[in-house]
Amino acid sequence: MSDLLNNILAKSDCNSVTISIPLNDLKNLVAYIIEDVTERNNQETAEKQVKATLTANEVCKILNVSKATLWHWKNKGILIPTKIGRKNLYKQHEINNLLIKNINEYE
């Protein structure tokens, strides 16, 4: 659908173009654009969430646990941090997965 519009605009030699398009085709074009934008936003959000990291202090506040608990969880393989320099960083999506898992087990 967008190729059709690109071809029309490329052939025009003025600053304004009048296009006559059937209503159904217009609806399909708008739906396509909305779907494309939504998909791109979802991908960007997912990528940001995967890349997001939290410090031990932030994780303790979010989960309302002590640093000792994080240490025990690391040893048990429940929540394993990524070591960057001297810091332990936790991936946001792993925190989210842990919360979801615990909510599902609680119900």
Image (spheres, rainbow, N blue to C red):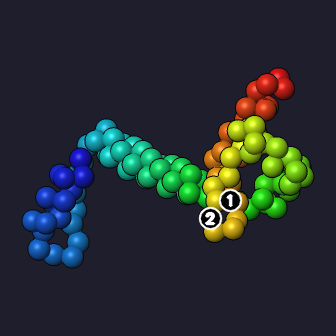
Q: Which SS class for mark 2?
A: strand
In this rendering, does residue 98 appear at all?
no
Choose top left, top right, bottom left or bottom right for residue 18.
bottom left
- Residue located at (36% from left, 45% from top): 32
Choose top left, top right, bottom left or bottom right for residue 79.
top right
- Taking the image as shown, residue 51 lies to the left or right of residue 25, namely right
Picture layout, residue 7 above or below residue 39: below
- Residue located at (47% from left, 50% from top): 43
For discs 1 and 2, the disc positioned in front in the rendered view: 2
- Taking the image as shown, residue 28 lies to the left or right of residue 63, namely left
- Residue located at (11% from left, 74% from top): 13
Q: Which of 47 and 89 is in front in this view?
A: 89
Choose top left, top right, bottom left or bottom right for residue 6.
bottom left
Residue behind mark 1: 89
Residue behind mark 2: 84
In this rendering, does residue 43 appear at all?
yes
Q: Which of 67 and 97 is in front in this view?
A: 67
The image shows residue 37 at horizontal and vertical percentages of: 43, 52
- Taking the image as shown, residue 89 lies to the left or right of residue 24, namely right
The image shows residue 45 at horizontal and vertical percentages of: 55, 54
- Taking the image as shown, residue 14 lies to the left or right of residue 48, namely left
Instruction: Name the disc covering residue 35, or none.
Output: none
Q: How far apart are marks 1 and 2 (CA)?
A: 7 Å
Q: Residues within 10 Å of mark 1 (few under 14, many from 20)?
A: many
Q: Which amino acid does label 2 sit on?
A: Ile
Q: Nearer the viewer, residue 70 or 102?
A: 70
The image shows residue 54 at horizontal and vertical percentages of: 70, 60
Q: Which SS class for mark 1?
A: strand
